[in-house]
Image (tube, rainbow, N blue to C red):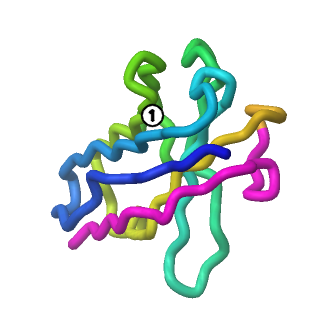
Amino acid sequence: QVQLVESGGGLVQAGGSLRLSCAASGRTFSAYAMGWFRQAPGKEREFVAATNWSGGSTHYADSVKGRFTISRDNAKNTVYLQMNSLKPEDTALYYCAATSRDWRSLIPGGYDYWGQGTQVTVSS
């Protein structure tokens, strides 16, 4: 089992920045690829970004490419999502997730463990 706890969400104006953190406990953190997803009201959960076990490989949804950066610190059992140039359409509940399978998965079903989410609200 892996337990994931997100933090760092909040209310920010358009153009601003936030950094989300996801602290992991339980099994060996470095054994898992990590991803961030988000879900806006009335919409399906969608992929945002992911990184492999070492942090050496990453990929992003087109909608956030160039604005968001995923990173991880295996010594701290933490994955981060730096979000810059935020837009109102980035407003959502953001979840981190862990997978022992294909780190390139873009679907929620590709991940094994989930946090409870942290709310990000971007005002115009």
Q: Quadrant of the C terminus?
A: bottom left
Which one is nearer the viewer's eye here, 16 or 39? 39
Report the side of 118 relative to 14 (left or right).
right
The residue at the point 50 percent across, 75 percent down is: 40
Q: Position of residue 119 (x, y in %)?
A: 35, 68
SS state under label 1: strand
Q: In this view, does 38 lie above or below 51?
A: below
Spot occupied by residue 86 in the image (x, y as percentages of width and height): 30, 54
Residue 48 visible in image: yes
Q: Which amino acid does label 1 sit on?
A: Val
Question: Which residue is located at x 22 percent, y 72 percent?
Answer: 123
| 13 displayed left or right of 21 | left
Q: Name the residue under label 1.
A: 79
Residue 79's place in the image compared with 74, above or below, is: below
**Start-end of magenta stretch:** 105-124
Q: Decide: is 16 above or below 92.
A: above
